[in-house]
Image: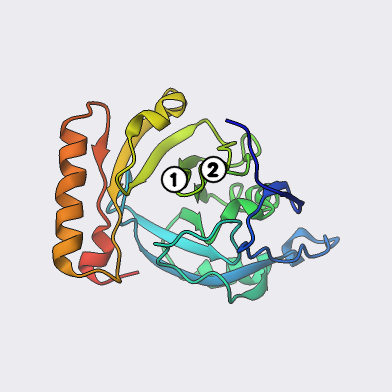
Amino acid sequence: MEDETPELIALPLVPIIEESIIPEKTSTPNDPLDQQFPIVEMFYSVQGEGFHTGVPSIFIRFGGCNLACEWCDTSFDVWENLTLRQIIREMAPWDCNRIVLTGGEPALQDLSALSNILRPMGYELAIETNGTIEIPEEVMDWICVSPKDQLYSSVKIRQQIGDELKVVWVGQTLDMYDELLNGFDHHFLQPCYDESKDSDWNGKNFRSTLEMVKNNPGWNLSLQTHKWMGVD
């Protein structure tokens, strides 16, 4: 399918839509620890969905996104620019070596700079991305792609290999992901939880997703357990 989205030269080549929020690229300092990143929040919790459900993790949420999904449950349009030195200092009290880069769209950031500093310190880096931006090789320990082409059919998925493919199901047919399946080891289908809808609507959507998983071997069910627990 032809990629019809406009493109913006940012950190990588970034497909954008009219509603995109792209942080300005900061200058590269002499000391990599002084490089700034747009941080919405950082917190220590457990992974609530997908393959690593229940695994303790440090979450770094970056500001900005090149898409604007109608069901998005995170705020990414307000952030504070922090240096990598400040980020490391904030993580220091947390006894955890697994970091999840999320957003917004974390692939907008200088992933190589993060990897070059954090991985030698013993941190494992995982990323949750919409897949529209290709990730440099060998900078992440775990790549989870959650494509949004069920909403943006003309936006090309450029990151076609990784560890985990996590699809939010809103009624689309699963054959649209046939070309992606072989590039990922684990395939998850996750019901869209719409906070604007009542529990009856969400319950029916959960049950429909369960039936899709049962009727499509090779797909596993992912649930947002952190929302049930009332944690970040």
Tag of residue 79: none
Identify the amino acid type marked 2. Gly
**Secondary structure under the numbered disc 2 in the rendered image:** loop
Looking at the image, which residue sits at the far right?
30
Crowd band around label 1 with a 10 angstrom C-alpha radius: few (<14), some (14–19), many (20+): many
Residue annotated with mark 1:
146
- State the colouring used for the structure image: rainbow
**Left or right of residue 151, residue 3 in this image:** right
Contact? badges 1 and 2 (CB < 8 Å) = yes
* 108 versus 135 height, above or below: below
Between 30 and 128, the one lying in front of the other is: 128
Residue 217 appears in which quarter of the rendering?
A: top left
Tag of residue 131: 2
Identify the amino acid type marked 1. Ser
The image shows residue 158 at horizontal and vertical percentages of 60, 36
**Secondary structure under the numbered disc 1 in the rendered image:** loop
**Left or right of residue 199, residue 220 in this image:** right
Residue in view at x 46 percent, y 54 percent: 97
Residue in view at x 13 percent, y 64 percent: 200
Residue in view at x 32 percent, y 49 percent: 170
